[in-house]
Image: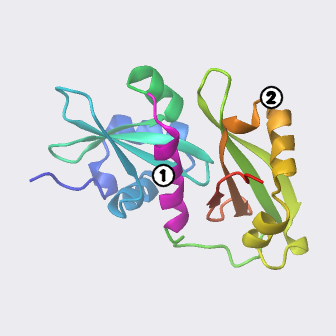
Amino acid sequence: MPRQAGHPAHFSRHAAARVAQRSKLSCFEIAMLVEARAYVRLGTKPGINREHLLFYSPPDDAFFVLLRDAIDGTVVTVLPLEYHERLAWAVGAAELTSAMTLAAQRSSAAESKAAPAVIRISVHYLDAAGKQKTTQVEKLDAARWPQGLTQVVKTYLTRAEVADYARRLGVPYGAIYGLSLRLGKHGTPLVVDPPCA
C-alpha cells in the first residue's frame, strides 16, 4: 500500500535540494501541506509511477508541482509551474484556482501576532503566450480598511480598478482569471474572481 508523502523523511535528497533552491517553504511545510491534501492532483505520465500534485505557496506567491512516487510516496522533486509546463503538460486556470482556494482554506499554524501594515493585491492572468502569471500590482495601507480584505473586495476592486491593472500588465481584461489579497507578506490569501460589472 502506498505511503503518504506527509513527512520530511519522504523527500529524496534531490527534492530537498530543489525545495531549498526554489521555494521559501521548507520540506516540512510542504510535507504538512501534502498531508493536509492542500493540492490538486494533476495525474501521471503514462508508464511512469509519479503523481503530479499542484499546490500554491503563499510565501512565494507562486504555484509548484510536486512529483511523488506513487508506489512508496517519496517526493522526487518540486517544480515551478513553468518548468512543469515545459517538461510535462500545461495546467489549466481551473486547477490553478482550485490550488489557490485550497491554500486559502488551510489554516496557518503560526500567524504573526503583530497586525500587518499592508494589504497586498496580486493579479493572476494569462500572458500573450498563454502562460499563467502572478504579479503583485498594489499595496494598500491596512489601517484604512478596518473591515479587512472583504471590505477591499466590495468597495475598492471595481471593474475600472482591475482594468487599470490589466493595462499596466499589458494584457486584455479577459486574460485576468483571478485576484488574491493578503494581509502582509505571509497572510492567508483571499482569492476572488475579477468583477464583471
Residue 59 visible somewhere in the drawing: yes
Classify residue 41 as left or right of residue 55: left
Residue visible at 14% across and 51% down in the picture? 2
Task: Judge by depth and name the residue closer to the eye, 74 or 9.
Answer: 74
Q: Earlier in the sequence, mark 1 or mark 2?
A: 1
Q: Residue at x 74, y 69 (%)?
A: 149
Q: Is residue 25 visible?
A: no
Q: CA distance from mark 1 to mark 2?
A: 25 Å
The answer to whether 23 appears left or right of 51 in the picture is right
Name the quadrant containing residue 188.
Answer: bottom right
Q: Residue at x 85, y 34 (%)?
A: 167
Magenta residues, start to end: 90-105
Mark toward the viewer: 1 or 2: 2
Percent of width and height locating residue 5: 27, 53
Mark 2 belongs to which amino acid? Gly
Residue at image position (88%, 74%) is 143
Residue farthest to the front, as pictured: 197
Q: Which mark is residue 99?
A: 1
Dominant secondary structure of the magenta stretch?
helix
**108 versus 21 height, above or below:** below
